[in-house]
Image (cartoon, coloured by chain):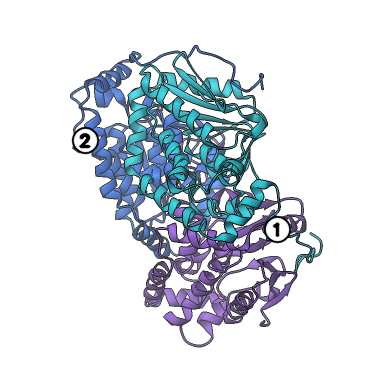
Chain colours: A cyan, B blue, C purple
Amino acid sequence: MTGAVGTEITDGVCFVTLAAAANGNAINFDLIDGLTAALDAVDADPDCRAMVVTAEGPTFCRGLDLEAFFVHGTLPDRDRLRRLPACLARIRRARVPVIAVADGEAMGGGVGLLAACDLVLGTTNARFMLSEPIVGLVPATIVPFLLLRTGPARLRAMTLSTRGVPAAEAHTYGLVDELVTDGVEPALRAQLQRIFRCAPQALAETKRYYDRLSAADLDQQIEIGLDQFTGWLTRPDVVEGVTSFGEGFAPPWFARYRGRMDVPGHSGT
Amino acid sequence: MTGAVGTEITDGVCFVTLAAAANGNAINFDLIDGLTAALDAVDADPDCRAMVVTAEGPTFCRGLDLEAFFVHGTLPDRDRLRRLPACLARIRRARVPVIAVADGEAMGGGVGLLAACDLVLGTTNARFMLSEPIVGLVPATIVPFLLLRTGPARLRAMTLSTRGVPAAEAHTYGLVDELVTDGVEPALRAQLQRIFRCAPQALAETKRYYDRLSAADLDQQIEIGLDQFTGWLTRPDVVEGVTSFGEGFAPPWFARYRGRMDVPGHSGT
Amino acid sequence: MTGAVGTEITDGVCFVTLAAAANGNAINFDLIDGLTAALDAVDADPDCRAMVVTAEGPTFCRGLDLEAFFVHGTLPDRDRLRRLPACLARIRRARVPVIAVADGEAMGGGVGLLAACDLVLGTTNARFMLSEPIVGLVPATIVPFLLLRTGPARLRAMTLSTRGVPAAEAHTYGLVDELVTDGVEPALRAQLQRIFRCAPQALAETKRYYDRLSAADLDQQIEIGLDQFTGWLTRPDVVEGVTSFGEGFAPPWFARYRGRMDVPGHSGT
């Protein structure tokens, strides 16, 4: 456990709580260390049959902690950048089903974290936004996990639009597996009850077998994403923009659209 | 025709009815023989322009007949197990569009049967459930057909959750092509009328052409699925569990979740 | 600009209007020339940050202009047929995000045009129909663009059913990116405002990077589509049927379904 993440294994379920609500549960090394420790605990406990990831506060996860990654200290190198996708790959390959409860906003890397989980319960409070182009980045390191859920078309539209997608819509994109409208707890309990009726070895084999069928080599895809990301960070304008953001300033490309308000071919519809 | 399946070609349409309602239209060799005979009849009739698969009773198909496959007689070998996916491949490659009407519950192999059809009309009574892990199995032999419709993410979530997915949700997964809310008969009639306006050779070429474009070699995928399934059945604990189920007993992994009912980070929402 | 297409770059946005409403904005060489000229204008203007495609009249685009392609003059050869997918590929590879507003019916090639755009806003007036089999064709030349959005299962069902799919349903297929229910103009303005907050180079790199990740070689897929289409047009019955349609006659396969109206296993539900 770290300050950013709480972990408790009880009655065969590992409950993991993102607990840095004041920081919007931003992804930094504290959070990655906490998730990794939880995965270690699950590996060490053969009686554990499921892992549940929840978050405190209104934001599930606001994405990469730009201040930690870009402002303080030196620019993150490839090995430090790999720690997030490597942690997500461990979630995806965990022996037990990993359930995430999305009950707030998820941005950038936070969408990647949810995408890596096996079952995402999404409430009407959940919203998913790929905000990277606003910061001047491309969401490359989490793309392997997003693609496995959304496919290329949804990923492309989400990134180019930078629109916050509500849970019901994200459900049709494959980012939410079960849309929760009558309370998180009954839905989560029902899901845990279903998992406890299943053969644990059949669930573990399902995860392994489906990954074997997949054409994509996840580890290779992660390195391709790191190629893009580290290459992109060799551009001074990119680093300048991201650092501005981390320090609370607007980057030079930030503009207000003040153009025509009517749509050609439409009369005010 | 077998007892399990009724077949009638009339006015250019082959109507196939799953007629073993008392057995939940479970998939056994009677049912496979009946479907195969219907496909033979379509092949032999150049004036036939569509095939329609419906089911009697509240269950479209409850999946593999465990009693027939596992309890009576010896464990099914690879050739017997191949008969289901081979039949589904014939449905998919039929010259004419194959329409299925899902108006009840489909489980396991029953979801595979629907997935192999070209056009699935789903009513509000339809529900789709991949129940294999409850029995201790992985839905490997029907996976090639499920993947073609749902993609890997939905398949993974459906299998790991074993949740019954209602038709409206299954529609967004690609398991239902048209959501029917105003009666099966008008929707089916409208679909047949649209098919009768199309060039039969263009529809047949569409099926062939789109299959040529597909990266997946269906026959090879079927053998990979049989590898998993026959390999899995070499495990005594798996066979013991499946046989228990077929005999009406609960397998050893069947447990009730009695753990914490609150969700960390939530106060009763 | 051609008569079929209006183009205006103002305040950093290139507005392109399909202006041949009387002809249902059918795809002919005037329309392709107009779109190409608009793309040239965007390439020439480094300050342009987005392109918006709208249509006049109730039909966004009724598909290939059969009269222009098949009735007058000789049968289109491969190079002339390539002009549509080549134009769609330029839209997809444009430096800036291309937004389409679907506020009416799109058929055949018109669905392909929308699919090639980066962000499709769809109103409740929008409807998507792959009508090719009615004309005796397979939608091969636009398939590479459809597949990138819908995946193989939706494409197959849309083509075999020839059903007009409303916007809300098309949204779940990946043909619509944002469902617009409160007026086109606020939704379009909000999207342009989001784009103006993003780093233009990050948006351009997102398009390039995601295309690099894609397994499909778009140019190769276009040639495969042209193989099917030109091969299919060597069949006299196909050419006869398409030409009939272009001249306003029904082809020989056009039939009325008059068969049984009840559904086996159902009692009038």
Of residues B22 and B205, the one nearer the viewer is B205
**Picture coordinates of residue C53 (x, y %)?**
66, 67
Residue A162 is at least partly visible in this image: no
Quadrant housing residue A40? top left
**Picture coordinates of residue A91 (x, y %)?**
44, 33
Crowding near the residue tagged with mark 2, few <14, some 14–19, many ≥20 C-alpha atoms within 10 Å = few
Question: Which chain does tag 1 point to?
Answer: A
Q: Decide: is C246 above or below A268.
A: below
**Picture coordinates of residue B97 (x, y %)?**
42, 53
Q: Secondary structure at mark 2?
A: helix
Q: Which residue is mark 1?
A: A254
Q: Which residue is mark 2?
A: B80
Quadrant housing residue C58? bottom right
Q: How many marks?
A: 2
Q: Secondary structure at mark 1?
A: loop
Q: Amino acid at mark 1?
A: Phe
Q: Amino acid at mark 2?
A: Arg
Q: CA distance from mark 2 to mark 1?
A: 64 Å
The tag on residue B40 is none
Crowding near the residue tagged with mark 1, few <14, some 14–19, many ≥20 C-alpha atoms within 10 Å = some
Residue A236 is at least partly visible in this image: yes
